[in-house]
Image (cartoon, rainbow, N blue to C red):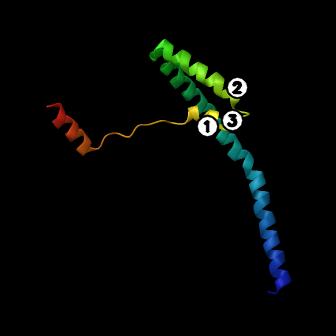
């Protein structure tokens, strides 16, 4: 197999691979759309439950933060950081033991 033949074989293989991707992408996108619709419905339900159980003042604060973030996101992309998950690390076992000893 000479270099020109090898190049032709590789070109054929890559073109076939890209063609197959193009054909199969519709199935992939349809599946992803169904998953996204299902996920959006679940998220909406969870959001409604959260809004019902949260204190009304906190809900008003969240809505104000959201409006401010959307208004200023074009000038300041860091305004969207309010959507980042903010978790506090749980205290370690030693910290818990120390706290219990100090409480006694």
Q: Closer to the observer: label 1 or label 3?
A: 3
Residue at the spot 18% in from the left edge and 35% down from the top edge: 102
Cα distance, mark 2 to mark 1? 30 Å
Q: Is residue 88 left or right of residue 84?
A: left
Q: Quadrant of the N terminus?
A: bottom right
Which badge, 2 or 3, comes first in the chain's sequence?
2
Q: Residue furthest front?
A: 102
Q: Residue furthest top?
A: 56
Determine contact: label 1, label 3, CB under 8 Å.
no
The numbered dot on residue 35 is: 1
Residue at the spot 63% in from the left edge and 37% down from the top edge: 78
Read off the residue under disc 3: 76
Q: Is residue 80 left or right of residue 58?
A: right
Cα distance, mark 1 to mark 3? 31 Å
- Name the spot of residue 62 as percent of width and height, x first: 55, 21
Q: With respect to residue 5, does 87 lie above or below?
A: above
- Name the spot of residue 88 as percent of width and height, x first: 40, 37
Determine contact: label 2, label 3, CB under 8 Å.
no
The numbered dot on residue 71 is: 2
Q: Is residue 72 left or right of residue 56?
A: right
- Name the spot of residue 23 as percent of width and height, x first: 77, 52
Q: Is residue 95 left or right of residue 6?
A: left
Q: With respect to residue 30, does 22 lie above or below?
A: below
Asked whether 71 or 55 is in front, the reply is 71
- Secondary structure of residue under mark 1: helix
Q: Residue furthest left?
A: 104
**Residue 97 image-quadrant placement:** top left
Crowding at dot 1, Cα within 10 Å, few <14 / some 14-19 / many 20+, comes out as few
**Residue 80 image-quadrant placement:** top right
């Amino acid at each position: 197999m000479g270099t020109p033949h090898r190049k032709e074989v590789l070109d054929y293989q890559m073109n076939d691979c890209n063609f197959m991707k193009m054909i199969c992408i519709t199935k992939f996108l349809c599946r992803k759309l169904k998953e996204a619709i299902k996920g959006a419905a679940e998220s909406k339900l969870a959001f409604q439950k959260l809004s019902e159980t949260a204190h009304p003042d906190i809900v008003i604060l969240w809505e104000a933060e959201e409006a401010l973030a959307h208004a200023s996101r074009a000038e300041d992309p860091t305004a969207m950081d309010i959507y980042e998950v903010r978790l506090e690390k749980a205290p370690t076992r030693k910290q818990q033991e120390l706290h219990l000893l100090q409480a006694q």
